[in-house]
Amino acid sequence: MRHPEAAVLPATRRSDLVGRLCRTMRTRIDDWTLTDRSVRIIRLLADSTGILRNPLTARSRSVRTESIRGQWVHAGRRSSAGVGAILYLHGGCYFFGSSRSHYGIAKRLSQHAGCPVFLLDYPLAPEQPFPAAQDATLAAYRLLLDTGLAPESIAIAGDSAGGHLTAALLNDIHRLGLPMPAAAALYSPAADLSGELARQANLRAPDPLLPFAFLAEGAASYLGGVPPTDPRVDILAADKRRWPPILIQIGELDILRDDAHALAESLHAADRDCALQIWPGQPHVFQILAGVLPQGRAAIRCSADFLRSRMVTGPAGHRPDEEQGPAAE
């Protein structure tokens, strides 16, 4: 793989236009408070993005167990070789987002990585606060191991709140003495659930896409009174000595840019392999806009290359995305 910084594209007129459109839309939700009604509306709006035209075709299969819900998504060609799998944890400030809202990003990641992606539907706040989402991600990782996948053939990726969940999962894996995955990719990760780093970044320059209130209220509803210094929540203070190689992608205008820097610094302090990419002129989780932004497409392709280059795949075996079960599509 090329040096991570070599993959970063500069801002373009198109990305500037998208940024202006995002700012215009954001002004309509800046004053929203998270009532039961507004949460339902936000969830519906987010999930509706999953029905937008996506040029990639994919096979998918729903998974429904007592503790796990999600979809296997595979946009690559069938192969007789063992190809591993990626566990994807969607964002949404812990109170919205799903396998529908992030289906497009999972398909692109699967296509470029050449392996299936398990897109987890974890429990959402405020109905199911901490530690429900983190317990679900841990159960999903155990599921991948139980299918027979070797840990070195598994990668994890996540955006925003899903970036925090990815880091929290690595923390839990270390805490429980489980085998570590091969690598992780974090898009605009939330590293500080106290919200202080995001508040400071927002005061300097608001994100074109994401209001600070969404982050603050979402984190508070997820924590449900648990302090952000809880050992399972405070990923900046986590023991990272066993963590795998990590790629962090952040937009220059991202409200979580300070979170990303702080997380990268904590990984470097633990002498871990961490690459931090800063994409000029891009907002929060610009990868979700890959359908219109070349920077989003390039970022997903780069992260897929990063994960794939560190995943060790073995001989042919049963494929976790082809287990018996109800078909999603």
Image: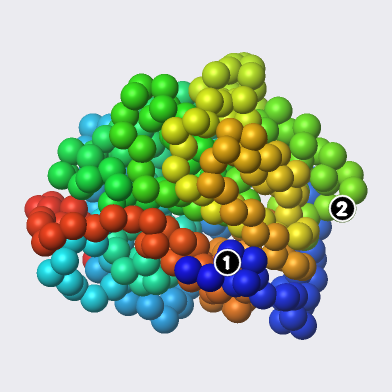
Q: Amino acid at mark 1?
A: His
Given residues 170 and 22, the one toward you in this image is: 170
Rendered residue at 74%/75% (across/down): 11
Helix, strand or loop at label 2? It is loop
Q: Amino acid at mark 2?
A: Ala
Return the mark for residue 205. 2
Q: How far is disc 2 from disc 1 in space, using C-alphas?
A: 29 Å
Q: Residues within 10 Å of mark 1 (few under 14, many from 20)?
A: few
Rendered residue at 28%/55% (across/down): 312
Q: Is residue 90 above or below residue 2?
A: above
Q: As drawn, is 309 to the left or to the right of 273?
A: left
Residue 90 is at least partly visible in this image:
no
Return the mark for residue 146. none
Return the mark for residue 3. 1
Rendered residue at 53%/70% (across/down): 2
**Quarter where residue 142 is shown:** top left
Helix, strand or loop at label 1? It is loop
Image position, residue 109 (x, y; %):
42, 65
Image position, residue 213 (x, y; %):
75, 40
Image position, residue 62 (x, y; %):
24, 53
Indicate the colouring scheme: rainbow
Given residues 36 and 66, the one toward you in this image is: 66
Image position, residue 56 (x, y; %):
38, 78
Farthest right residue in view: 204
Q: Is residue 19 above or below residue 189?
A: below
